[in-house]
Each structure stands twice: as C-alpha cells, then as structure tokens.
Amino acid sequence: MTTQQAAGALAELARAGVSIWLDDISRERLVTGNLAELARAFGVCGVTSNPTIFEHAMTRGTAYDEQIADLALRGVGVDEAIRAMTTFDIRWACDVLRPAHEATGGVDGRVSIEVDPRLAADTPATIAEARALWWLVDRPNLLVKIPATPAGLPAITACLAEGLSINVTLIFSLRRYEEVIGAFMSGLEQAYAAGRDLARIASVASFFVSRVDTEVDRRLDALGTAQARALRGRAAVPNARLAYEIFEREFASPRWQALAARGARIQRPLWASTSTKDPSYPDTKYVTELVAAHTVNTMPEATLRATADHGVIAGDTITGGYEEARAVFAGLEAAGISYADVVAVLEEEGVRRFADSWADVRASVGARLRARSPAAAAAGR
C-alpha cells in the first residue's frame, strides 16, 4: 500500500467529518519518528493514551532505561517516576502534533493522558491529579482523561471550570453519556462565570464501542439459542449511534446555544475501543459503521492501517438509524440481555483493568528503579 493510497482512503473519513486519532503512544514511536510519519502519511491528528497503553510501552524493550537510571540516581519514588516518564512522552507527542493543533484552530492536534486509575472513586484526588498533569505537561493541546464514574463527573466539571481541557473516558451507557454532557456544560458555565475564555477549553467524550459487543456476545453465547446467535455483534454500533442522537439533541439545546454564543466549543463524541475483538467481524467494523460529522475515531495502528488498506467509507452511517438501533436493544431485552447490567459491568471492569495495568507498571518500574539505585550499584561492586 502506497502513502497515496493510504491518504486517499483515510481522507474520505476526514471529509466525512471524522478526526483520525491514534490510540497508542510509546517512547519508541517518538524516538523513531513513527508518530510524525503517521501524521504525515495517514492524517493522524490526535493521540490517546491510557494505563494499559503505558503498561505495554513501559514494560517492554529498553526505550525508558536511560530515564529510569537518572530517576533512580535521584532517589525518585515509583509514582513520581511513572509520572515523569508518561508526561515526558505526552509533552513530546503534543509538540509533534502542534502543527495540526494550529492548523485546525485548536480542534485537533490533541494528546490525552489519563489520571491515575486508582483515583476513580475519589473526586478531590482526581481533581488534584488532573491539575498536576496539566501543569507538568504544560501544552495547550493537552487533554487530561478523567473516567466517567460517579466520582469522576464532579471532577470533570471542576476541572473544566478551572480551564483544563478534558477527555472524558470509559463511557458505556447512554444515561451516563447524558450525565457527562451535563457535567461538561456545568463546567463551562462555571468557567464563564469566573471570567475564563471558553474558546480555549476543549473536551471530547470517549464512548467505548467494541467492548459492548464483547460483553453482550458473551451473554448471547451463554444463551445458545438461534435468536441469541442472530443478535451477535449487533449491540455496540447501535449503542454508539444512539449516543450520537443524544449528542445532536443536547448540542442543539438552548443551554448549549447560550454557551456557544459565549465562544464555547462543542464536546465531540470520540469512538474508543475500535479494534475488532472477534475475528469473525470485519476489522474496520467500528470505523466504517460509525461515520458522522463532529466525531473522533481513535484507532490502534492495526485498525488505522486496515482502514487505509480496505475500509470503505460511504458517508454518514449514523444519523437516520436511530429507530433501527432502538429495535436492536428491544430485541436484546426480549432475549434476556439487560442493557443496564451490561454497561454497569463494563464500567466496573474498565476501571479495574486500568488499575491492574497501573499496578503492573508500578511493579515493573519499581523493580527497575531498585536495580539502578545507588544502593544496588554499591552492592554490586
């Protein structure tokens, strides 16, 4: 596949109003220039990270060895060491994508870093961590990721009110998405009351996609009926489409119009978890079936390349399909699949997975810091 072919395929997606972001970051991508190349050749204009992505990056290879050695010599603790390493990568990525940020008037060129997932149930600690990350990275195109947990919602409002740009993550349910939009608008209203420039505050709402099919399919397989088999792979896309219906409604409301008149930018829906987990499904399923204006699709590199290679972009594939989407969920409920239970399980599981990844990062980095410490060096002499 040539660069021209890749650009042509993904350009169709961009022309349809979808911003193409990469769902990955690592020191290796930055050192080798891979991120800059993906921006040039594939139209990547944003980056998202999460604890699992950093776990993969930081527990493999040698890219972080030199920084770990310096941190060990300074006696830096494991949590501050991780913060130093992750913010270094994010700052670098922000600089790589700064041209996209400037070319789009601040809409794209955004890079996300997530607060410590162990804080998901602690509102004040989440706010404090978000402030720290904002100060440490110190780039205008940063987004701080805060999970859409009950404790995360007031933290989202508070951080936006202070002028921080926020990526709201781990959204699975339609009801929670409505609450996220409410938290977003409340934050902007408070920011305006405090005299802040609303045009400088950005936000996206990360609605997770493929994991919905994974969980629903697991339950359908357990049922084992012909009716259940016919519903496999049909939950995630309708869920996201109905989220877009909420987006259209809420961002046409008088409340939003008042904020827009004061310079506010919309909070775009971001389709996250867009790699296909079931190999029987098309590998571009969660890209080509979720095309609409004012959206972001953040893809792992494999999904990005698959879309460039053979993805067929047929214009808007979201609007107009809302009644069909509701019919799918009526069928799932009739089959005995509880939507409320599915999304509750996914939110709890999402927080736990990220916390587990963070624990793995802490264990790996802690061991490497100890191995490089002055005490370890002295013992080896």
Image (tube, rainbow, N blue to C red):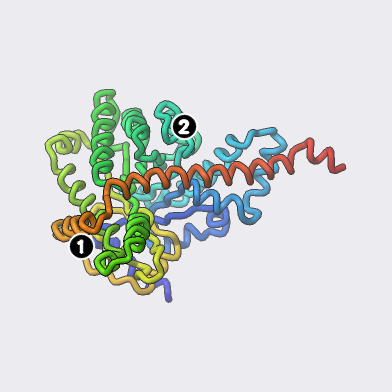
Density class for disc 1 (Cα within 10 Å; few <14, some 14-19, many ≥20) is some
Q: Residue at x 74, y 43 (%)?
A: 371
Task: Tell me the residue at 24%/61% (across/down).
Answer: 16
- What distance separates the C-alpha of mark 2 from that of mark 1? 38 Å
**In the rendered image, is residue 44 in sight?**
yes
Disc 2 target residue: 129
Q: Amino acid at mark 2?
A: Glu
The one of 163 and 80 positioned closer to us in this rendering: 80
From this viewpoint, which residue is outermost toward the top? 194
Q: Return the x and y of residue 188 as percentages of the image width and height.
A: 26, 32
Mark number, residue 284: none
Q: Earlier in the sequence, mark 2 or mark 1?
A: 2
Nearer to the camera, 320 or 120: 120
User: Residue 314 location in percent, x, y?
Assistant: 23, 69
Which residue lies at the image location 29% right of the left edge and 57% below the top edge? 236
Labels 2 and 1 touching (C-beta < 8 A): no
Query: At numbered mark 2, what does the secondary structure look like: helix, strand or loop?
Result: helix
Task: Give x and y (percent) for residue 73.
Answer: 72, 37
Residue with the most extreme right position: 381
Mark 2 is surrounded, within 10 Å at the Cα level, by few (under 14), some (14 to 19) or many (20 or more) other residues, namely some
Q: Is residue 295 above or below residue 227?
A: above
Q: Which residue is mark 1?
A: 316
**Hey, what amino acid is under mark 1?**
Asp
In the rendered image of this protein, does residue 322 appear above or below residue 182? below
Viewer-nearest residue: 22 or 303: 303
Residue 69 vs 323, above or below: the answer is: above
